[in-house]
């Protein structure tokens, strides 16, 4: 429903303009180093809230609002007319692994694809993209790559036994090495193996909304 999507995006932008961010965005802030620092916040119990606060200090609004009927989206990247970068998220799937990947994917769009506030709005349904690989454009693949590298650098992922032997011990080991929450490792393994029943005890189900939806838009 295009009209519902437009309404959701307008709502996100309106909330972002009222957010009263602690900082002013500087072009170039969102780079690989910044995203890696953000990913490390996942190790804290209130990681999603800490991420929202860190973004606000750098002039970036993270706004959470439930998706409207007949809209199926996880997140979006956009700018306000005042040149404030905005990540909108629905927390449609209340899981830590989904939250962190979606957040970093949208930030990659801002940092890599329209860093000066010019360009289109990026709207993502990550589940739909999972089922339709051939529809991905280059920018989506680039955003995926930035997000994946921020969460688990390839030099760690490529050499760790967790990628082929997804045991509890290996999940925890890779999470320690990557300095991220085990949910992120479990989510990556589930994605790579196309098995979403695997490691479900690790993905942090029902742990995001209580942190971000209490004052959600």
Image (cartoon, grey):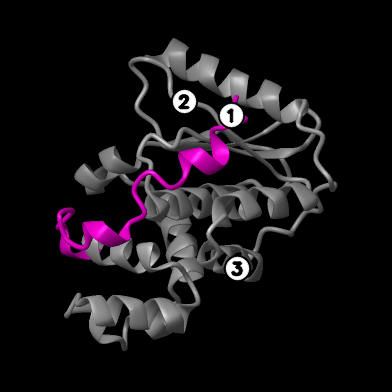
In this view, the mark in front (3 or 1): 1
The residues colored magenta run 192-217
Whether label 1 touches label 2, CB < 8 Å: yes
Q: Quadrant of residue 166?
A: bottom left
Q: Which residue is mark 2?
A: 66
**Is residue 195 in the magenta section?**
yes
Q: Which residue is mark 3?
A: 32
Give whichever of discs 3 and 1 has the lower sequence position: 3
User: Which is nearer the eye, 99 or 213?
Assistant: 213
Q: Is 78 on the left or on the right of 66, as rendered?
A: right
Q: Is 162 on the left or on the right of 36, as rendered?
A: left
Q: Secondary structure at mark 3?
A: helix
Q: Let me know if residue 20 appears in the view.
A: yes
* Residue 216 disc label: 1
Cα–Cα gap, marks 1 and 2:
8 Å
Q: At x 15% / y 54%, what residue is drawn?
A: 197
Give whichever of discs 2 and 3 has the lower sequence position: 3
- Dominant secondary structure, magenta: loop
Question: Crowding at label 1, few (<14), some or many (≥20) Cα neighbours within 10 Å?
Answer: few
The residue at the far bottom in this view is: 159
Q: At x 28% / y 41%, what residue is drawn?
A: 127
Q: Secondary structure at mark 2?
A: loop
Question: Crowding at label 2, few (<14), some or many (≥20) Cα neighbours within 10 Å?
Answer: some
Cα–Cα gap, marks 2 and 3:
29 Å
Q: Secondary structure at mark 1?
A: loop
Q: Position of residue 25 (x, y in %)?
A: 80, 48
């Amino acid at each position: 429903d295009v009209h519902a999507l437009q309404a959701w995006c307008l709502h996100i932008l309106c909330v972002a303009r009222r957010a009263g961010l602690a900082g002013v965005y500087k072009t170039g802030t969102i780079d690989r180093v910044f995203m890696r620092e953000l990913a490390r916040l996942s190790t804290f119990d209130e990681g999603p809230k800490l991420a929202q606060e860190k973004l606000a200090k750098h002039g970036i609004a993270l706004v959470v609002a439930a998706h409207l009927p007949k809209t199926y989206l996880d997140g979006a990247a956009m700018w306000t007319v005042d040149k404030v970068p905005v990540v909108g998220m629905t927390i449609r799937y209340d899981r830590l692994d989904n939250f962190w990947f979606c957040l970093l994917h949208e930030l990659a769009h801002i940092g890599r694809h329209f860093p000066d506030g010019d360009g289109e709005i990026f709207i993502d349904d990550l589940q739909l993209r999972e089922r339709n690989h051939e529809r991905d454009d280059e920018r989506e693949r680039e955003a995926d790559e930035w997000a994946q590298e921020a969460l688990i650098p390839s030099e760690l992922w490529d050499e760790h036994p967790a990628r082929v032997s997804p045991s509890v011990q290996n999940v925890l080991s890779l999470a320690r090495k990557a300095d991220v929450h085990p949910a992120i490792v479990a989510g990556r393994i589930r994605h790579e193996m196309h098995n979403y029943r695997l490691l479900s005890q690790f993905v942090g189900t029902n742990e995001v909304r209580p942190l971000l939806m209490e004052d959600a838009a």
